[in-house]
């Protein structure tokens, strides 16, 4: 039996928005491990985005750059408003922060960390489709 997608996905969003990036990664990984459709690729992109910010918080910029690149590449295949969230602000921030950490050893202030915007179920259902 699959884990409850909405529960784990929304838990991950709450962790991400609280800048608890490792915990977001863990929540999303629970459903990523059992996903059977292209939702698996979406979740992997979200996990990579959270992991990139985890590296930024730790100051391991080389790992952050690699994960930002992977996350943005993977997520580009999906609508910006998908699976109950609007990622536009988070992805724009990720592009900026990727460049910042690639060029400098300065830390990104936590006040600049992005948030995911929750959408109503009518705008974007969770999970994004019956088969996930």
Image (cartoon, rainbow, N blue to C red):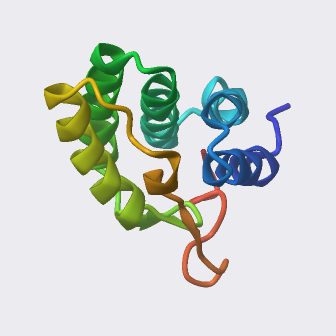
Left or right relative to 51: residue 91: left
Against 126, is 51 above or below?
Answer: above
Q: Position of residue 69 (x, y in %)?
A: 24, 31
Task: From the viewer's side, name the closer residue of 94 and 118.
Answer: 94
Quarter of the image that includes the N terminus:
top right
Which residue sits at x=18%, y=27%?
A: 102
Q: Residue furthest front?
A: 106
Q: Residue furthest bottom?
A: 122
Q: Is residue 80 visible?
A: no
Which residue sits at x=56%, y=60%?
A: 83
Left or right relative to 23: residue 75: left
Residue 59 falls in image quadrant: top left
Against 119, is 58 above or below?
Answer: above
Quarter of the image that includes the C terminus:
top right
Residue 29 falls in image quadrant: top right
Q: Position of residue 37 (x, y in %)?
A: 50, 39
Residue 74 falls in image quadrant: top left
Task: From the viewer's side, name the closer residue of 70 and 125.
Answer: 70
Task: From the viewer's side, name the closer residue of 108 and 18.
Answer: 108
Which residue sits at x=32%, y=20%?
A: 61
Q: Residue furthest right?
A: 1
Which residue sits at x=34%, y=46%?
A: 75
Q: Is residue 115 visible?
A: yes
């Amino acid at each position: 039996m699959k884990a409850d997608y909405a529960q784990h996905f929304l838990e991950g969003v709450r962790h991400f928005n609280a800048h608890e990036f490792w915990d977001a990664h863990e929540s999303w990984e629970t459903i990523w491990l059992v996903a059977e459709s292209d939702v698996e690729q979406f979740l992997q992109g979200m996990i990579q985005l959270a992991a990139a910010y985890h590296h930024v918080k730790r100051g391991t910029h080389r790992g952050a750059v690699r994960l930002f690149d992977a996350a943005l590449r993977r997520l580009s295949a999906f609508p910006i408003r998908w699976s109950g969230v609007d990622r536009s602000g988070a992805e724009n921030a990720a592009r900026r922060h990727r460049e910042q950490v690639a060029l400098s050893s300065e830390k990104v202030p936590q006040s600049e960390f992005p948030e995911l915007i929750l959408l109503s179920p009518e705008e974007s259902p969770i999970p994004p489709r019956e088969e996930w």
